[in-house]
Image (tube, helix red, strand yellow):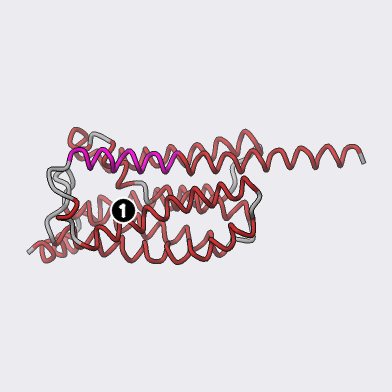
Amino acid sequence: MATAITAGVAQRSVLASERRFFLIMAIAIAITVVVGFTMNAARMHWSFRDLPTQVHLHAAVFLAWIVLYVVQNWLIVRGSITRHRQLGVLAAGIAAVMVVLGIVTTVMAVRQHRVPGFFPPGIFLVLDVLGIIGFGILTAWAIALRKQAAWHKRLMLCGTILVMSPALGRILPMPMLGKFGPLAVFGSMAVYVIAGMLFDLRSRGRVHPAYWWGAAVLVVTQALVGPLGFSPPILRLVARLAA
């Protein structure tokens, strides 16, 4: 009996520690995104009012996701499971809109010649589109496994990490990195995934399979950026869009 009680207490302690960890990761992601776009705004030589409508909508929806992701993890730490599940319906809707808006806004950026100068247009198009598709895949999977908490929260974390690339691209010295810019963005995102893996190793003694799947999606999407970004079909598409 005493052994069972001790094991139960230890398990609850690990769970509480894990929930705090995911909240900390959510806050770290939010800070990264805010810092990245704040730095970008400080460097801008144009007014927010000059931006197309889809850019404003894109920014609002993506910011809503980041805020909601922090709130959802905070609710779990508080033990507000019912409210967390209620907001999960809203989160699913926002995620679906994000995928559509992410692709549309990227295409419009190429069409309106708003691609950052340090990115070849084909690389920019493929990097952003693959990132948002990877986010959609991992987030949809996380929602499907919402009753399996261990899978759900890790897949949700990995999916959210994938939409950090625009913010990281504004923090990193991309003009100085040249052709290694996409690799630097990939490495920065990988740091967050590795942090989750290391926490699992310390608290559970092994890395949960969800992280390996999340890491695989991250690696595959990034590995395809170069070959696709400079491929003739993408170059022709970019030329038509920018014409």
- Which is nearer the eye, 155 or 206? 155
- Residue 118, located in which quarter of the rendered image? top left
Residue most extreme to the right: 1
Measured from the top left, where is residue 159 in percent x and y? Answer: 45, 53
Q: Position of residue 88 (x, y in %)?
A: 54, 61
Residue 34: x, y in percent? 35, 42
In the foreground, 101 or 124: 101
- Up/down of 66 relative to 202, above or below: below
* Mark 1, other Cα within 10 Å: few <14 / some 14–19 / many ≥20: some
Residue type, numbered disc 1: Leu
Principal SS element in the magenta part? helix
- Left or right placement of residue 91 versus residue 162 in this view: right
> On the rendered image, what quadrant is the N terminus found in?
top right
**Picture residue at 12% right of the left edge, 43% below the top:** 45
Q: What residue is at 47 percent from the left and 41 percent from the top?
A: 27
Magenta stretch: includes residue 20:
no
Nearer to us in this view, 108 or 162: 108
Provide residue 106's location: percent of width, then percent of height.
24, 59
Q: The C terminus appears in which quarter of the rendering?
A: bottom left
Taking 158 as reference, is 84 left or right? right
* Residue at the image point whose x is 12% and y is 56% from the top: 113
When the figure is inspected, residue 36 is found, relative to residue 94, above or below; the finding is: above
Left of 74 or right of it: where is 66? left
Question: So how many labels did they put on this image?
Answer: 1
Residue 180: name its quadrant. Answer: top left
List the residue tagged with mark 1: 224
**Which residues, given as a range, are shown in magenta?**
28-43
Which residue sits at x=64%, y=53%?
A: 80
Label 1, secondary structure: give it: helix
